[in-house]
Image: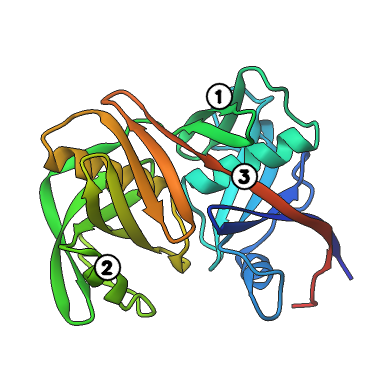
Amino acid sequence: MQTLSFAKGHATRNDFVILVDRENMMPVDDRTVRWLCDRRGGIGADGVLRAVRAEHIPEWQGDPGLWFMDYRNADGSVAEMCGNGLRLFVRYLLDEGLLGTDAIRIATRAGLREAWPYPDRRIKVSMGTATISAEQTWIESADRRYRADIVQVGNPHAVVHLDDRAELGALDLLTAPTFDPAVYPSGVNIEFIVPAADDQVAMRVFERGVGETQSCGTGVIASAVSHLRNQGKPAGVVTVTVPGGPLRAEISPEQAYLSGPAVVVAQGRVILPDF
């Protein structure tokens, strides 16, 4: 019988199980991730964050002494990046005394990321360069086809612009939208957005490997980039409101930043089943 120590937390209600495995002694497989994230039979979460020293990650070529955020979606699939997960990852490591407050750097599959804690316990994180294609693609949901912007935030996104809040609220995201597999061979995170003002957007998201979530950090950045381009702006600050609450996206051609809360709500031990 194997047991794991865990923490549970969320960032604008995008929730995660956190595992600390400094020396890479207990890597988790996709079956274990699915069980941990099961909201009936496990702990319940949108994904799993495993904290491991970067020296143990073969694909990481940077500083081996950094913490590496090994992120898995709820279905067990590996994801390159998760903005909400990154903020919670940093919050937990800070609270446990496993990080200093100066020059916080985290290794991820999308590259090096930095973080800045605020006194009110919000955390700001760098998200890398977000790019938007000159071409558009299509997304289908409930037998309706939409045009969508193609955005990369270290992971793939499709951003659909809707006309009003009523249309946004009426979306049926219990069923996965479909997309062009030639554009997104590894799947895609799909955002539906409605402008509320020049600097405000409302958003819902269907995350690959998870389903509809209350928030998606990289999706917030993708939505802000798409919203700004519609205004003819290469940079700006946008407040994106998701079902889990508001987040601040700062966009420039060189770097994107995401700011918002991150909360650890529980710690304990879990008994893994004999698969």
- Which residue is at a point 80% across and 70% down the rendered structure image? 272
Left or right, 249 with respect to 1, comes to left
Mark 2 burial class by Cα count in 10 Å: few <14, some 14-19, many 20+: some
- Which residue is at a point 80% across and 31% down the rendered structure image? 97
Mark 3 burial class by Cα count in 10 Å: few <14, some 14-19, many 20+: many
Q: Which residue is mark 2?
A: 168
Label 3: which secondary element = helix
Label of residue 166 in the image: none
Is the residue 55 above or below the residue 181 in the image?
Answer: above
Image coordinates for residue 10, horizontal then vertical, percent: 61, 54
- Which residue is at a point 46% across and 56% down the rendered structure image? 215
Amino acid at dot 2? Leu
Closer mark to the observer between disc 2 and disc 3: 2
Amino acid at dot 3? Leu
Image coordinates for residue 223, horizontal then vertical, percent: 29, 48
Q: Quadrant of the C terminus?
A: bottom right
